[in-house]
Image (cartoon, rainbow, N blue to C red):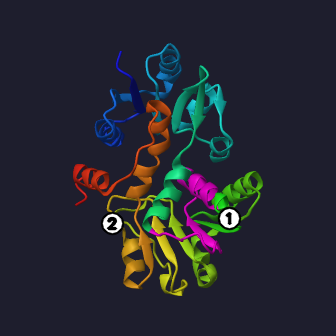
Amino acid sequence: MTRTAFVIGHPVAHSRSPRIHKYWLDQYGIEGDYVKIDVSPEALPGFVADLRSGSHLGGNVTVPLKQDMMALCDETDELARTIGAVNTVYFENNRLVGTNTDWFGFLANLDAEAPGWDKDPGPAIVLGAGGAARGVVAGLAQRGFSSIRILNRTSDRAQSLATELGTALGVAIHGYGLDRFADFAPETGLVVNTSTIGMHGSRFEHLQMNLLRPKALVADIVYTPLVTPLLADAAALGLRTVDGLGMLLHQAVPGFEAWFGTRPEVTPELRALIERDMGLT
């Protein structure tokens, strides 16, 4: 039987994960496959039962199944529980283990594209208070950022998430409305957009990017388009920028290693392949 991993979601047709993992399977000469399977939330328990019977090695989990999968795993790691979602599952000693690799993908992308970005972990601003913000904040805490401000359109949601994550991670996290950006920008060395603003040409209004430190880094997890309005504005001011495509590529690394036993590399050739496949070039 071919050793096969998967990505499940509902819908899942848009996923580029098969292109990434099949590229690595070919590059490393590994006999295996990676498929996408549309699984509704109602069908997830049945899918996991088949998984336990040996149908697949494991796989990736995308919306809207990330939270539901947590309850179906035998074990979840601490960061997955903190983030509140599972995006990767694998078997260890016949137990189904759930983890979350979003934080890893975020950190690895910045390490690759902006080496030394975490050398002086001063105050950081995280834009957005949704699920993606959880992984980014967890990653920043891992790298020693002890002052993190979550700014969101609705300040109540930002405050709630900040309180929850601050307690879980043991770092100073505070939540505010987006209108407080100008108050914190002068002392901020890192800004990360975790919201969907930037897709389809949408943009943040009234963010005074010119108030940021001259050497500040601005990162966006949105990768369609590669250069979002936020990144374009930052680049026009001479600030360093990192787009979101690398996070998609790097977050796939731990899963591939867990399923197929080889730790893959994110190469320029892989990035170029995915850019062409998504029509980003």
Is residue 237 depicted above or below 139 in this figure? below
Pick out the residue farthest to the top: 53
Q: Dot 2 corresponds to which residue?
A: 201
Q: Dot 1 corresponds to which residue?
A: 144
Picture coordinates of residue 179, whole percent (x, y): 58, 75
One can see residue 115 in this view: yes
Q: In which quarter of the image is the C terminus?
A: bottom left
- Mark 2 lies on a secondary structure that is loop
Q: Quadrant of residue 128?
A: bottom right
Picture coordinates of residue 215, whole percent (x, y): 51, 83
Q: In which quarter of the image is the N terminus?
A: top left
State the extent of the magenta-drawn residues as a range. 114-140
- Mark 1 lies on a secondary structure that is loop
Give the numbered dot on residue 231. none
Picture coordinates of residue 19, whole percent (x, y): 30, 41
Label 2: how many residues lie within 10 Å, few (<14), some (14-19) or many (20+)? Answer: few
Picture coordinates of residue 243, whole percent (x, y): 40, 64
Residue 133 drawn in magenta: yes
Relative horizontal placement of residue 94, taking residue 263 as reference (left or right): right
Residue 275 drawn in magenta: no
For image coordinates 40% across by 72% down, the residue present is 231
Amino acid carrying mark 1 in the image: Gly
